[in-house]
Amino acid sequence: MHLLFVGIVLALSSLVSSLDNGLVRTPPMGWMTWERYRCDIDCEDDPENCIGEDLIKRIADKMVDSGWRDLGYVYISIDDCWTLKARDSSGRLQPDPKRFPSGIKALADYVHARGLKLGIYADLGNYTCGGYPGTTLDNIKIDAETFAKWEVDMLKFDGCYSNSSEKAIGYPKMSAALNATGRPILYSCSWPAYEGGLPPKVNYSLLGEICNMWRNYDDIQDSWESVLNIIEWFAENQDNLQPAAGPGRWNDPDMLIVGDFGLSYEQSKSQLAIWAILAAPLIMSNDLMTISEDSKELLQNRLMIYINQDPLGKQGKRIAKVGCLEVWLRELADEQYAVAVLNTGTDGLPKRFTTSLAELSITKCTFGYKLYNVFDKEYLGTFKPETAFQLPVNPSGVVMLFVRPAALAYHPL
Ligand SMILES: *[C@@H]1O[C@H](CO)[C@@H](O)[C@H](O)[C@H]1NC(C)=O
Ligand SMILES: *[C@@H]1O[C@H](CO)[C@@H](O)[C@H](O)[C@H]1NC(C)=O
Ligand SMILES: *[C@@H]1O[C@H](CO)[C@@H](O)[C@H](O)[C@H]1NC(C)=O
Ligand SMILES: *[C@@H]1O[C@H](CO)[C@@H](O)[C@H](O)[C@H]1NC(C)=O
């Protein structure tokens, strides 16, 4: 009996073994340049938007002053287009001195002094996607050492300009090279996105052992269409994706575009609700200098963040789809749950959705559950599992509920 139990525990723990660098036991939160700032290197004519240390410092200051850091948004990441077009005489990547006059180490110091972490970008291949020097298999060791020497905290490793067999060698090799530096560096792998994101081409057990997070699918664009397309892909493939995630190892549906140009207020809630259910990294790409109060309040919603950061680390799933209404459910620690009802329709009349906790398979606590509306910041009362209730769901919007056993007193609103 005892041996059998040990055997089961071992089997379970090997199933969920993750990259052993101690990082991101809950999904990483932060900010990244790519979706909003792209490859803008024109600091002369577009100083507000160009990729350089000035932008990173302004954002870092904002992350502290406007409360982002204290809510958990601590990674601040430079994406593509930060280097010169050639390596230096010793073969190292070098930042463009016009845009990063102080160098990356000084920038890391600036960011660290504010209680934040610095992320950087490289690409396994001949070039980065933007045409800057790539990291070929031969360069992996020197690049890992360079990033560690600069005291960088996160690496996004893209995959343009390499083939599948090079990727199969290069992604594990970079993981080992980062480990060998002795510096814990969050390792974000774009590998699966280049292989279609699904088994048998993608081995999620292996990914979880070598990467902390990975992009599974297409780049997000600044539109609701793009968000919906990503949501649908994650739902359709959830049986492959959901078991891959856990503490230290996360699926990444890509950046949050809340606060940019493309999403309405309702659509912004929808992206946040589904990303929280998916246990996705909450990495914004937006202009924190000019963001609206509405967008800021949504991104800083404490209950949404609490759900996303649940310590169980179990990714949620779409459990029903009826016409344009979708029901998403995530199991949280302490028998708590998060539910999102999404209306993908464009019919202007809010859809009334009637359900009960029992219908959502939330039945364990016969005393009932306290229900909170996450984005309305409203306590809805205590509900027995079989009690029916109705939710009006706005077009391209969502109602997100936090469900907590009635016996648990504290609520995190
Ligand atoms: C390197 O890997 C070993 C073994 O998995 C682990 O114990 C150690 O913490 C890792 N170090 C870093 C810096 O990631
Ligand atoms: C990378 O460069 C090598 C050497 O020039 C070339 O043989 C290879 O095809 C290139 N790979 C890709 C994916 O572009
Ligand atoms: C991938 O690239 C490597 C090195 O450039 C080459 O040796 C190999 O044949 C290529 N593999 C495929 C499947 O194209
Ligand atoms: C996937 O990777 C795991 C862990 O490295 C390995 O044990 C397993 O054999 C691989 N699966 C396939 C189908 O290659």
Image (cartoon, rainbow, N blue to C red):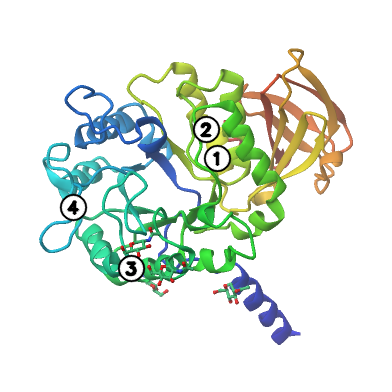
Q: CA distance from mark 1 to mark 4?
A: 44 Å
**Which label sits in the foreground, 1 or 4?**
4
Q: CA distance from mark 4 to mark 3?
A: 17 Å
Q: Residues within 10 Å of mark 3 (few under 14, many from 20)?
A: some
Quadrant for the C terminus in the image: top right
- Tell me which corner region of the image, top left, top right, bottom left or bottom right, holds residue 177: bottom left
Residue 137 tag number: 3
Q: Is residue 47 left or right of residue 353?
A: left
Q: CA distance from mark 2 to mark 1?
A: 6 Å
- Element type at mark 3: helix
Q: Earlier in the sequence, mark 4 or mark 3?
A: 4
Residue 253 spot, x, y in % from top left: 55, 44
Q: Earlier in the sequence, mark 2 or mark 4?
A: 4
**Which label sits in the foreground, 3 or 2?**
3
Residue 278 spot, x, y in % from top left: 61, 45
> Along the line of sight, which residue is nearer the eye, 92 or 60?
92
Badge 2 vs badge 1, beta-carbon distance below 8 Å: yes
Q: Which residue is mark 1?
A: 306
Amino acid, disc 4: Ala
Q: CA distance from mark 3 to mark 1?
A: 40 Å
Q: Which residue is mark 2?
A: 302
Q: Is residue 371 left or right of residue 47?
A: right
Q: Residues within 10 Å of mark 1 (few under 14, many from 20)?
A: some
Badge 2 vs badge 4, beta-carbon distance below 8 Å: no
Amino acid, disc 2: Arg
Q: Is residue 336 visible?
A: no
- Element type at mark 1: helix
Q: CA distance from mark 2 to mark 4?
A: 44 Å
Residue 34 spot, x, y in % from top left: 38, 37
